[in-house]
Amino acid sequence: MSDAPSRRPAAARRPAASSTLFSPADADPAGLPLKYLAGYPEPLLEQVRSLIAQDRLAAMLARRYPEAHAVRTDRALWDYVQELKAQYLRSSAPLSKVQYDPQVRLLQQALGTHRMVSRVQGGRLKAKREIRIASLFREAPAPFLRMITVHELAHLRHLEHDKAFYQLCTHMEPDYHQLEFDLRLYLTQLALEGRLSG
């Protein structure tokens, strides 16, 4: 068995359709905060429990994702998102706002949101698209910021989390599924350290 859990087989890549990124369960039977890993196979959860028990989860994540990013301001985030959008989604509707949002919290069961805001301009209704990324991504490793950005950009084309949505995510970021799983490990580690509420 390897030091760290890795990508799941294709059949087990996504939790059940009713699962969200965050399960309402507070902890698994062992009392560990594994709510971010709800819906994953038990053998994988056992590997995670083992890493936690041996106090190796944080070191494994730091070794796997040592690089920070310089995208700290809303302006830098706007530029970052626009660059990805121009590369992969040129024909998609323009974005009116991109920002880090401290209001996007775990209690909302989201790490980012995409919104269509309708406003009246003259006698017409105009829809504007916004992407808001949870503020915890200011300090997260660079690949996790890319993963959540790719996820929110994919919603410009596909509103539902269906097969086409995940195909677009993996087109923009080939390691999308592994990054999503590792992000869940990262959130679990932050919860263990008491740095997450919700």
Image (tube, rainbow, N blue to C red):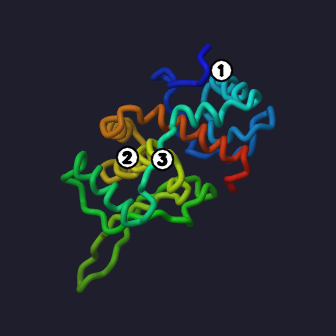
Q: Does dot 2 land on a helix, a strand or a loop?
A: helix
Residue identified by numbered label 1: 43
How many other residues sit within 10 Å of disc 3, few (<14), some (14-19) or many (≥20)?
Answer: some
Q: Marks 3 and 2, Cα distance to the nearest angstrom? A: 18 Å
Q: Earlier in the sequence, mark 3 or mark 2?
A: 3
Give the residue type that dot 2 points to.
Answer: Val
Query: Which residue is drawn at the image coordinates 34% and 64% (left, top)?
Result: 129
Give the residue type that dot 1 points to.
Answer: Pro
Residue identified by numbered label 3: 68
Q: Position of residue 51 (x, y in %)?
A: 69, 28
Please determine whether, in this image, residue 76 is positioned above or below residue 173.
Answer: below
Residue identified by numbered label 2: 150
Give the residue type that dot 3 points to.
Answer: Ala
Instruction: Name the quarter where the N terminus is drawn.
Output: top right
Q: Marks 1 and 2, Cα distance to the nearest angstrom? A: 28 Å
Please determine whether, in this image, residue 101 is positioned above or below residue 142.
Answer: below
Q: Nearer the viewer, mark 1 or mark 3?
A: 3
Query: Which residue is drawn at the image coordinates 48% and 31% (left, top)?
Result: 178
Tell me whether the residue at label 3 lies in contact with that at label 2, contact meaning CB atoms closer than 8 angstroms. Answer: no
Using the rendered view, name the quadrant where residue 57 is placed: top right
Position of residue 193 in the picture relative to residue 93 (left or right): right
Query: Which residue is drawn at the image coordinates 51% and 37% (left, top)?
Result: 65
Q: Does dot 3 land on a helix, a strand or a loop?
A: loop
Q: Earlier in the sequence, mark 1 or mark 2?
A: 1
How many other residues sit within 10 Å of disc 2, few (<14), some (14-19) or many (≥20)?
Answer: many
Instruction: Name the quarter where the C terminus is drawn.
Output: bottom right
Q: Marks 1 and 3, Cα distance to the nearest angstrom? A: 31 Å
Q: Does dot 1 land on a helix, a strand or a loop?
A: helix
